[in-house]
Image (cartoon, helix red, strand yellow):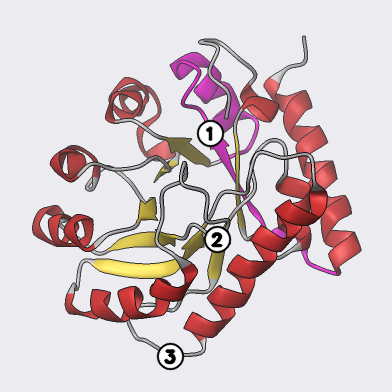
């Protein structure tokens, strides 16, 4: 079985190759190691391998790992966040990847002790099974967030369809990049919107080619412990 460090070396090489194809700088791509399916010990291995960004999708995951790892990591909440859970999450994390509704923004404003870097989740593919606002709603939604001083929109997030068709995946990521460029050009003080959170274990290479600045990679780095895939 490969170690976390060996898996990570392979991922980093794939990112470098994708950046070379796209004429990008690999330093512009941040790996978020999704540790939701493993315990604190495996998460610690990730930190020791040089990755500082860890992603969790449940409050319980944060509560389990933060006492062990704490400020050694920058914490990303990548799952759908229920409004009633905001108070348990928002002051523990550095990034939220799933801002997708006004009620959630209102609760963040109420509970956050400091501005939080947020990605607005966009359902580019239009699949009913995926969360996120529609691309046509994104600009208006982000404009409305200007009333909340605890929210800073650093970028957009999406998930590609679960398909073997590369062009479908590529079109999804390209669509998010074009939307990001559109919103960034608005010059909104609360929404610099320079970042793109897209790409997972099975499609991060395509995401990097299409401009991803944060890739959320789970099992390809940490393997399996509980049987969950990420």
Question: Residue 6 sits in which quadrant?
Answer: top right
Q: Kindly identify the residue that appears in the image at 43 percent across and 90 percent down.
A: 187
Question: Marks 1/3: CA distance?
Answer: 31 Å
Where does the magenta region start and end? 23-51
The location of residue 156, given as percent across then percent down, is 49, 64
The location of residue 3, given as percent across then percent down, is 73, 17
Q: Is residue 153 above or below residue 74?
A: below
Residue carrying label 2 = 124
Q: Which mark is residue 34?
A: 1
Question: Marks 2/1: CA distance?
Answer: 22 Å
Question: Residue 74 sits in which quadrant?
Answer: top left
Helix, strand or loop at label 1? It is strand
Question: Residue 26 sits in which quadrant?
Answer: bottom right
Helix, strand or loop at label 3? It is loop
In front: 9, or 191? Answer: 191
Q: Which mark is residue 187?
A: 3
């Amino acid at each position: 079985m490969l170690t976390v460090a060996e898996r990570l070396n392979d991922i980093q090489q794939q990112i470098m190759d994708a950046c070379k194809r796209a004429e990008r700088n690999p330093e512009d791509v941040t790996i978020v190691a999704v540790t939701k399916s493993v315990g604190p010990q495996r998460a610690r291995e990730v930190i020791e391998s040089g990755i500082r960004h860890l992603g969790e999708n449940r409050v319980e995951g944060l509560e389990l790992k933060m006492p062990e790892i704490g400020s050694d990591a920058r914490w990303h909440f990548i799952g759908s966040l229920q409004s009633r859970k905001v108070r348990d999450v928002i002051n523990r994390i550095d990034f939220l990847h799933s801002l997708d509704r006004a009620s959630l923004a209102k609760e963040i404003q109420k509970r956050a002790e400091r501005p939080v870097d947020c990605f607005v989740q966009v359902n580019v593919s239009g699949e009913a099974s995926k969360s996120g606002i529609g691309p046509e709603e994104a600009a208006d939604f982000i404009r409305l967030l200007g009333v909340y001083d605890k929210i800073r929109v650093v970028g957009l997030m999406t998930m590609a369809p679960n398909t073997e068709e590369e062009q479908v995946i590529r079109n999804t990521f390209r669509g998010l990049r074009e939307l990001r460029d559109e919103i960034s050009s608005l010059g909104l003080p609360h929404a610099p919107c320079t970042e793109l959170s897209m790409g997972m274990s099975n499609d991060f290479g395509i995401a990097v080619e299409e401009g991803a600045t944060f890739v959320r990679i789970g099992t390809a780095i940490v393997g399996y412990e509980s049987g969950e895939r990420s």
